Image (cartoon, rainbow, N blue to C red):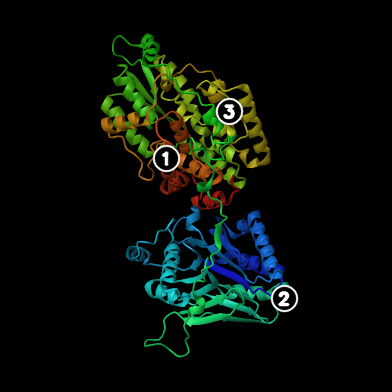
Amino acid sequence: MCGIFGVICASDPSVDRALARRLALSLLKYSETRGGEAAGIAIHDGDRIEVLKQGGSVSEFLANPKLGAMLDGALDNYDRRRRAGMGGALAIAGHSRLATNGAQSNVDNNQPVLTRGAVALHNGIIVNDRAIEARHPQLVRRGELDSEVLAGLLRAHLDQKKDLIEAARETFAEIQGSASIAMLFDDLDAMLLATNTGSLFQLTGDSGRLIAFASERFILQRVLEDRELSRGLGDCQLEQIRAGHALAVHLSDLRRRAFALAPAPGPGRQDEPPGGDFAPNGHSVAIVDQSPRPDRLKRCTKCILPETYPFVEFDEQGVCHYCRTWKQITPKGEQALLDAVEPYRSKDGSPDVIVAFSGGRDSSYGLHYVKKNLGMNPVAFTYDWGMVTDLARRNQARICGKLGVEHIIRSADIIAKRRYVRKNVEAWLKRPEIGMVTLFMAGDKEFYAHARALRKETGIKLVIFCTGNMIEDAPYKTGLMGVRHDDHGNTLTGMSLRNKVGMLTYFAKNYLRNPAYLNESLLDTANAFWQTFVVKDDFLYLYHYLPWHEDTIVDTIRREYDWEVAEDTTTTWRIGDGTAPFYNYIYQTIAGFTEDEVMLANMVREGHLDREEALRRAYEYGRPRWPSIREYAQLIGFSAEEALQIINAAPKRY
């Protein structure tokens, strides 16, 4: 189960701020035994409640400089309020997560939970959260957490009853499962501690001006075993908040009200005064979530590129320079394409063109177009390097079968290729560097060499690649290496010497910084660079000639061939590539955007869709593809959960 903990200090000059800081950090550290998938903290300094949370271990959270800055800022404000006689307290509450409901890689699935006017930390599992949502349609959760439903329910009862004690009782009467909670409110000068299992313990200093709490007695005992902390706390009383009981604590003076969550039946008990002193006070403080979130990024007001996009610059109107310098895409046209292929047409119906065929949407439409519209006799060619998905293979079979097209497959040493990828993924995880993600895809670049070899083997001189679509151009890949992308004339071999040298320099520096990259994949990676950027090609790129319209392409192949889409995403781009879900998750988590967002921004510039639709699609496409990510990890041979934990804790560009 998860661990919750916290410290509450009264507005009193005798309270040592350094002690409060160290105590909070010690409780965070000691609570790591309760769960290491995510961590978070909420700090109420009298003026506002600040929240910070992230995926990854408590140790990684402790290393986040934003945590220290937030603590110091709150303590400074606490001191200022004390000196000015303004009252108010300092309340710090935190959480270490053992993931139960919802993946920790989604920040909305981590705690503290923010609901309307409240911040909650929850240890336990609510098993009837769906039923509660059905009874209370006003409850809207952003993530998958049952804790979010619990917090929203208690806040709703507080709004209705205007009494924290009655709200807590109503909530615990409605939930099924286990719950130990700590809650702060924007309009109530109190913290609620409540449990139906007894997994909540409190430690009170001898002065009564400081309270600490945690999910286990052992955690508070470790605090007492720390000589420096124990000396600062003095004589302490450690006691359990018993199952079915709660504690409401005034933040200003630490007056406490203990109460049972299930009051005795009847008209009331004489020893239970009303809880009116724990009613909302009408004075609201701000709740500020300081957690890094890509959905809060500043974006171009014309397209959707975020502020984390490499080399992006915004003008006074918020328009990015990529929009300001965009040149409308002008394909050469169908007649130019007909003229280009005419010399290669066979006179006897024999094969006259090789079409590179991944099974993705662009190559599927391309093979259809070459056969149906150009009237040529293609041979489809696929290079399987171990990352062609079963979905792609089924789509290849559908289209080749219906078109009556020969399908030639060249297969790599797939076991070796996957081993190379695994070693580079493992190297990357040792030192996450976002520009090095491209190494994961280096193994597929041999398809250029195989296309050249197949041309010699078959005697077919014309090879068509169904690429060249500038809407799918990806200059961010070099940009994330610190290399400003030059115009490459729609082919990678046309990339400028400056860009190529910049990329090689970047790779060399990172190989030196991280010797784990110096593994058996090195020659394979070097060959990929050579085949992609150095060897001159004379292939024909279909979308240099044809306009690219996503709806036309997808509608055609879906209608004509029952082309299959993925079940875990609404995008149709790269769904036949097993690496895409993993590297897009890295891009989204660390840089705040995916390759789909780059494509959508280009589609806005080309007039294919408006900005609002692009933002909607970006949200849909950006959702992590968990089944595909786990399948990729299984194929390659690394732990998906360990990798996700490292990615979540890696430094962000936002």
Check disc 2 and report its element: helix, strand or loop: loop
Quick check: 163 left or right of 570?
right
Check disc 3 and report its element: helix, strand or loop: loop
How packed mark 3 is, by other alpha carbons closer than 10 Å (few <14, some 14-19, many 20 or more), is some
Point out the frontmost of discs 2 and 3.
Answer: 2
How packed mark 1 is, by other alpha carbons closer than 10 Å (few <14, some 14-19, many 20 or more), is few
Taking depth in this image into account, of 210 and 102 the one nearest to the observer is 210
Q: Which residue is drawn at 47% across and 61% down?
A: 115
Q: Distance between the residues labelled 1 and 2?
A: 55 Å
Looking at the rendered structure, the number of numbered marks drawn on it comes to 3
> Mark 2 or mark 3, which has the lower sequence index?
2
Q: Residue at x 67, y 82 (%)?
A: 206
Q: How far apart are marks 2 and 3 (CA)?
A: 60 Å
Location of residue 212 by image quarter: bottom right
Q: Residue at x 37, y 39 (%)?
A: 390
**Residue pointed to by mark 3:** 485
Q: Where is residue 137 in the image (x, y as percent from the top left)?
A: 34, 61
**Residue pointed to by mark 1:** 612
Q: Where is residue 580 in the image (x, y as percent from the top left)?
A: 46, 39
**Residue pointed to by mark 2:** 14
Does the residue at mark 2 contact the one at mark 3 (Cβ under 8 Å)?
no
Quick check: 636 left or right of 266?
right
Q: What residue type is labelled 2?
A: Ser
Q: Does residue 294 appear in this view? A: yes
How packed mark 2 is, by other alpha carbons closer than 10 Å (few <14, some 14-19, many 20 or more), is few
| Residue at the outermost bottom position | 270
> Mark 1 or mark 2, which has the lower sequence index?
2
Q: How far apart are marks 3 and 1 (CA)?
A: 27 Å
Q: Which mark is residue 538?
A: none
Q: Which amino acid does label 1 sit on?
A: Glu
